[in-house]
Structure formats: structure tokens, C-alpha cells
Amino acid sequence: MARNAEKARNVLNRWVAMQHSDALGTGGAVLRPKHSSDCHSAAAAEKWRNEVLNDLHMKIRAIENVNLGEHRARELNDEINRLVRERHVWEMRCLELGGPDFRRAHTVVDDAMPLGTKGGYQYYGRAKDLPGVKEMFQPLVEQQKKMRTRDDLAKIAGPEYFGMLFEDEAVLAAEKAAEMQARGLV
């Protein structure tokens, strides 16, 4: 029985693998273009966008690991932010080439529930628990606790706010007269 290494070196097996990759359109190890402007078809742009999404999925899964070290968490977070920007570039290129508009559905990043900054840099998974990041977002968390909820606002606004109280007949008559005068019917 031949070993796997010997099978891989076999010319016929390499030929069949090449034919199979050509039929699928993978064409071997083709690297993603550095600039989206190098891509000239919507199908290829969509393919590269999907590849970026797959990389993004893997990185987000990796950063969710609680046992991840601080250095690796920062590194993964940087890579995720770079991939998010790259995904946006490929989505814009797909749109330019007449492909679908992907801007509506960003489930990968939304599922990770990132903490964001004003500069657009976001923190995912384990990176949210890093020492410098916790202090940076502490005022934001306290501010959200102080904000009134919809239920609090509904309790404050009484029935008069919603117009549920009966108004005085004299007030209604005065309003009716002012309305008629404004319309020019008097």
C-alpha cells in the first residue's frame, strides 16, 4: 500500500487535483489582491469578500477564548478591525461592479457585540476585558446606567401628556374660535 506522501507525488493525482480545482474555480493558491481596484468582476469581488468574512469568522471565534493571553488578544483584535475595514472595501467594490449590496447585513460583527470608540476602532471578545479598555469604557457604562429607560419616561409622563384628561369647555371653545380665525372663516 502506498503512503499518502507517495500518492500526493503521483503525477496522475496532481493532474486530477488541478482539473478539480479548475472546475471549482479555486485555481490553486491564489492570493487576495492587495487593492480592490485590481478586481474587475463582481463575482470575483464577491468571492474575495466571502474569503474576508471567513477569516473574520475564524478570528472572532479565536478571540472569544477566555484563556487567551493579553498580547494575543490585542493582536487578534487589531486583525479583526483590519478585516472589518477590508470587508467594507470589498463590499463597496462589489457595488461598483454591479454586484449585490451587502451593507444591510453585517451579522458577523454584530454578533460579537463590540465596544466601539469614536475613531471606529472596536474591541471584541477577550479584548473588551483588557486593562486599558475597561477603564476607557467605564464612563460610558456609568452613563448608560444613568440614562432613563422608556418605562421611566412613561411613568413620568402622566395622563395629561397623552391627552386622556377632559378639558374645560371654555378652553375648547376658545381653541375652536382661534382655529376658525386662523383659517379665515370668521
Image: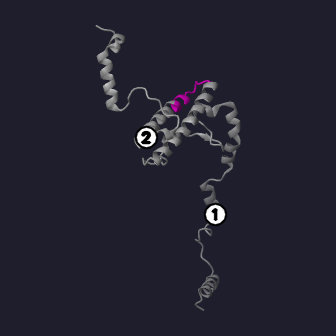
Q: Is residue 2 above or below residue 90?
A: above
Determine the image quadrant of residue 26. top left
Q: How is the image coloured?
A: one colour
Quarter location, residue 140: top right
In front here: 147 or 140?
A: 140
Q: CA distance from mark 2 to mark 1?
A: 50 Å
Q: Amino acid at mark 1?
A: Ala
Task: State whether residue 108 appears in this view.
Answer: no
Observer-side mark, 2 or 1, equals 2
**Residue situated furthest bottom in the rendering:** 186
Q: Estimate the x, y position of residue 92 in percent, counting from the top left.
A: 50, 46
Which residue matches tag 1? 157
Residue 46: assigned label = 2
**Whether residue 2 is situated above or below residue 95 in the rendered picture:** above
Please state the horizontal and vertical placement of residue 25, each as a whole percent of the image. Answer: 36, 32
Tell me the amino acid under the disc marked 2: Glu
The answer to whether 23 is drawn above or below residue 92 in the figure is above
